[in-house]
Amino acid sequence: MLALIGLTWAMAMMAMTVGGVRAARHRAYAAADLAALAAASHSADGPHAACGLAARIARGSGGRLRSCVLHGRVSEVTVSSGLTSVPALRNLTATARARAGPEQLPIPTTMQLSDS
């Protein structure tokens, strides 16, 4: 009976750990997406202002901005999120990258067909 209780406890702890890791991963991806969109939409204000806004958005979404780079109107951000729900794993982080900006239209090409 004691072994069954121990097994049940171990399975419950494993399920909580997996759930915490998945939640941190999803939080990091959501924060990265939102931060990249914010930085790209404010790229005209300059990299300092755009990345500052991205940092505030990431922090408000439960993450931490690790890097922010602007290439013209395209932003690339990296956000990390800690595992806060599992006390034993508080020092682990989930990291996500996101890129946002205007859609690049394909360069029109002309093709010539020759009758042979």
Image: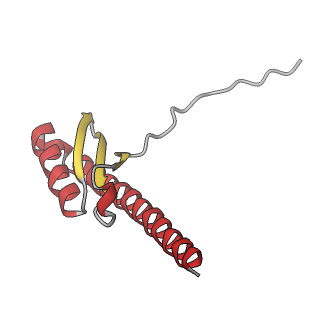
Q: Residue furthest bottom?
A: 1
Say if residue 37 shows up in the picture.
no
* Foreground pick, 95 / 116: 95
Image-quadrant location for residue 46: top left
User: Across the whole image, how many numbered discs are drawn on residues?
Assistant: 0
Colour scheme in the image? secondary structure
Residue 83, picture quadrant: bottom left
Spot occupied by residue 70 in the image (x, y as percentages of width and height): 25, 36
Q: Is residue 41 left or right of residue 106?
A: left
| Residue at x 17% of width, y 44% of height | 51
Residue 101, percent from left and from top: 34, 45
Is any part of residue 99 visible from this angle? yes
| Location of residue 116 in the rendering, given as x and y in whole percent from the top left corner | 89, 17
Q: Is residue 21 above or below residue 16?
A: above
Residue at 49% in and 65% down: 14
The outermost residue toward the top is 116
Name the residue: 32% across, 52% down: 32
Residue 115 position within the rendered picture, expressed as x and y whole percent measured from the top left: 85, 21
In the picture, which quadrant includes the N terminus?
Answer: bottom right
**Residue 38 in which image quadrant:** bottom left
Q: Is residue 15 above or below residue 88?
A: below
- Does 15 sit above or below residue 113? below
Q: Nearer the viewer, residue 89 or 26?
A: 89
Q: Residue at x 33, y 49 (%)?
A: 92
Question: Please, which residue is most extreme toward the front here?
Answer: 2
**In the visual, does 51 lie left or right of 83?**
left
Which of 90/10 is in front?
10
Q: Is residue 54 left or right of residue 76?
A: left
